[in-house]
Amino acid sequence: MRVAVIGANGQLGTDVVAALAEAGHEVVELTHDRVRIEEEASVQAVLAESRAEAVVNCAAFHDVPRCETEADRAFAVNAIGALNVARAAERLGARCVYFSTDYVFDGRKAAPYTEEDSPRPLNVYGGSKLAGEHLTLAFCERALVVRISGIYGRVPSRVKGENFVSKILSLAAERPRLAVVTDERLAPTPTREIALRLPLLLEQGATGILHLACEGDCSWFEFAREILEISGLETPLDPTTVEAFGSSVRRPEYSVLDSSRLVSLGVVRMPHWRPALRSFLQNAPRRAPSGASLP
Ligand SMILES: NC(=O)c1ccc[n+]([C@@H]2O[C@H](COP(=O)([O-])OP(=O)(O)OC[C@H]3O[C@@H](n4cnc5c(N)ncnc54)[C@H](OP(=O)(O)O)[C@@H]3O)[C@@H](O)[C@H]2O)c1
């Protein structure tokens, strides 16, 4: 299949490009200098030229605090951008994949969220991504919305310049101790685990909404503790709360995704977040803090 990947050099896009190529697909890599998804003409021209049979939209404006103050930009990229990509894909008769987020939920549920649960975003980022989901599904007949959570990859997020794993490792090298929140729970997921499942989903023609996150769940504090332990770092970790941390943005306290629909589609189950993290840290080249022995 000929697949165009938008945001091809991003954290997720890099692994998506690699996984599609490894599965034998022809990949058209589209970076920001080639297409601005909020501009309809730009999207139409580039995708028409690509002659893609599937379009994977990994582009986003996902700096959560900045989305609060730059709502126009958040909706331009995450919602209107999604609409433009979906329409252009539909015009080509192509499939369209839109990556969304656990932040479409309000976090009040005490069990993992399924695809049937009603979204209720708490912040502008989540609202703009939910709008992008609706527009993608409405304007492309063969659309798949993939909700993911707490992602980390070999290439850190381009919008943020880091991911939680790289941030904890670099802070552990700089500071005598770290404080991490205990009152937000999620299922952190390596981008490679998401990307590896995409080729089969495309080949099978999966449509609708799909949750794709690692099994199990943890707080950011537990996630940080595991990162330090696996890396052989002894930097002390202090538990804190979102309130004490002084975050300006409301986020769901609990945004664990139930990924069992994946198995019903015949795709291999997601790993538990702990072995997935271990495998990532043991295989990924990373900055080694001075004096630390890395496994
Ligand atoms: N990070 C998380 O924990 C998380 C959690 C749940 C869901 N997600 C979702 O996962 C997806 C991928 O995130 P990521 O971490 O891989 O992001 P990323 O590393 O920041 O990559 C985003 C890519 O999109 C490109 N891009 C940004 N704005 C664009 C625009 N207007 N037009 C065209 N291209 C544009 C960027 O190019 P430039 O850098 O050159 O601008 C970059 O290549 C997003 O949909 C995000 O909402 C992320």
Image (tube, rainbow, N blue to C red):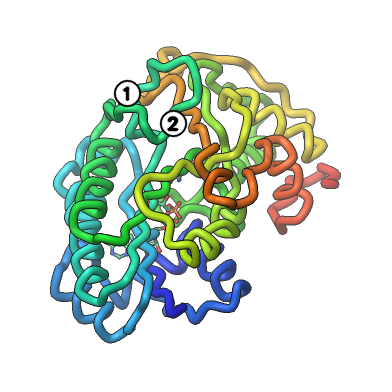
Q: Is 258 drawn above or below residue 111 in the view shown?
A: below
* Picture quadrant of ligand 1: bottom left
Label 1: state its secondary structure. loop
The residue lying toward the viewer, choosing from 242 and 175, is 242
**Which residue occupies 50% across, 16% down?**
183
- Relative to residue 238, is residue 144 drawn left or right? left
* Residue at the disc numbered 2: 114
Q: Is 31 drawn above or below residue 291 in the view shown?
A: below
**Which residue occupies 35% across, 27% down?**
117
**Which residue occupies 62% across, 43% down?**
270
**Which residue occupies 82% across, 37% down?**
232
The verdict on label 1 being within 8 Å of ligand 1 is no
* Residue at the disc numbered 1: 250
The residue lying toward the viewer, choosing from 7 and 199, is 199
- Relative to residue 52, is residue 167 drawn left or right? right
Give the percent coordinates (x, y) of residue 180.
Answer: 57, 23
The verdict on label 2 being within 8 Å of ligand 1 is no
Give the percent coordinates (x, y) of residue 252.
Answer: 39, 23
The residue lying toward the viewer, choosing from 118 and 256, is 118
Whether label 1 touches label 2, CB < 8 Å = no
Label 2: state its secondary structure. loop
- For label 2, count other residues whose C-alpha is less than 10 Å away and answer few (under 14), some (14-19) or many (20+): some
Q: Is 145 drawn above or below residue 260 in the view shown?
A: below
For marks 1 and 2 on the same chain, the one whose residue lies earlier in the sequence = 2
Give the amino acid type for the residue marked by disc 2 in the picture: Thr
Give the amino acid type for the residue marked by disc 1 in the picture: Arg
Among the 4 quarters of the image, the one containing residue 222: top right
- Cα separation, mark 1 vs mark 2, equals 22 Å
Give the percent coordinates (x, y) of residue 42.
Answer: 19, 75
Give the percent coordinates (x, y) of residue 150.
Answer: 51, 39
- For label 1, count other residues whose C-alpha is less than 10 Å away and answer few (under 14), some (14-19) or many (20+): some
